[in-house]
Amino acid sequence: MRTSLGRPLVIGVLVVAVAVAGFGLYWFQPWKLWQDETVREALPTAAASAADPAPDASPDPARTPARDPRTLAGGALISHEHSTSGTVKLVRLPDGSHVVRLENLDTSNGPDLRVWLTDAPVREGRAGWHVFDDGAYVSLGKLKGNKGSQNYTVPADVDPSAFSSVSIWCDRFDVSFGAAELGRV
């Protein structure tokens, strides 16, 4: 006589296997390795404010803010967990606000990538993969695309001079895809 225990066991194993595969696909998102998202943002400029002099008035250099964005610091991205290249700039806009600008970024796509302003030193190789969450950092938001040029607003209550590097951080796996030291210019 044959027992019917084998069929429910097979069904149970299949259900568990499908659940594990579904979770693995959600967690690792392997299709992102073949998907590129290119972003081409221009550097933002501040609009003229009401405090600016009228167009026909002669400007007072002591009271007129600079009209052009000013790069305060920058550096080249180095690779960590994934091959990464491009440059990073910390820019003060004419209205006094700050942005972190990624230019000519080229890295792998991945799940839950963020742009972090950090106080951690940038280290080459595997030694630099996990250091950025050890100290102070500010998440500037999700990475808009893994290729191109893009801007990230530094919150008004954050002093950018307290930070020395930028990391493309994978929040899901707590690892840096690439990072740049912010050298003063």
Image: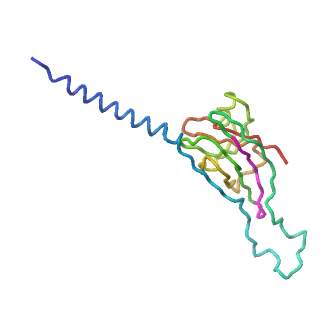
Based on the displayed image, in which of its 4 quarters is residue 81 positioned? top right
Does residue 94 belong to the magenta stretch?
Answer: yes
Q: Percent x, y for residue 98?
A: 74, 56
Q: Nearer the viewer, residue 66 or 101?
A: 101
Up-down: is 10 above or below 44?
Answer: above
Q: Nearer the viewer, residue 52 or 75?
A: 75
Position of residue 10 in the picture relative to residue 104 (left or right): left
Q: Percent x, y for residue 121?
A: 75, 35
- Considering every residue shown, the one lying at the far top of the view is 1
Based on the displayed image, in which of its 4 quarters is residue 54 positioned? bottom right
Magenta range is 85-96
Q: Which residue is drawn at the image coordinates 20% and 23% (left, top)?
A: 6
Q: Which residue is drawn at the image coordinates 65% and 51% (left, top)?
A: 148
Position of residue 123 in the picture relative to residue 176 (left or right): right
Up-down: is 20 above or below 167?
Answer: above
Does residue 168 belong to the magenta stretch?
Answer: no
Q: Percent x, y for residue 154?
A: 69, 53
Q: Which residue is drawn at the image coordinates 14% and 20% (left, top)?
A: 3
Secondary structure mostly seen in magenta is: strand
- Considering every residue shown, the one lying at the far bottom of the view is 56
Q: Nearer the viewer, residue 116 or 135?
A: 116
Position of residue 6 in the picture relative to residue 41 (left or right): left
Count of marks overlaid on the render: 0
Way the structure is coloured = rainbow
Q: Percent x, y for residue 86?
A: 71, 44
- Considering every residue shown, the one lying at the far front of the view is 34
Up-down: is 162 above or below 151?
Answer: above
